[in-house]
Image: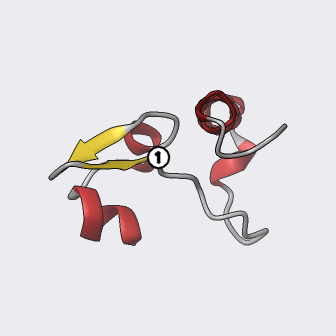
Amino acid sequence: MAIDALLGKMPLAQAVGRIHDRDGVRFLPLPHPSGASRWLNEPAHRELRRRAIRLLAESGLIRT
């Protein structure tokens, strides 16, 4: 996974919805939207995704 390569091995729930700073670069991981992934079926995981989207909107990088 890209998260492993860029941020190191960690659970997806620990990576999504948080800004990570590595070597002067900021990362905001998002889960893959694939229908094959069951990760987003969990309510807590959906909240992490919403949190990440809010962080992107607050940064001005996207509009919600």
Q: Mark 1 points at which residue?
A: 28
Quarter containing the N terminus: bottom left
In the image, taking residue 7 as reference, residue 51 lies left or right, namely right
In the image, taking residue 31 as reference, residue 12 lies left or right, namely left
Compared with 21, 3 (above or below) is below
Query: Which residue is the extreme one toward the left?
Result: 23
The x, y position of residue 22, in whole percent, is: 20, 49
Compared with 36, 63 (above or below) is above
Identify the secondary structure beneath mark 1. loop
Quarter containing the C terminus: top right
**Total labels drawn:** 1
Residue 21 found in image quarter: top left
The x, y position of residue 47, in whole percent, is: 67, 28
- Residue at 20% x, 58% y is 8
Compared with 35, 27 (above or below) is above
Q: What residue type is labelled 1?
A: Leu
The x, y position of residue 46, in whole percent, is: 70, 36
- Residue at 27% x, 64% y is 6
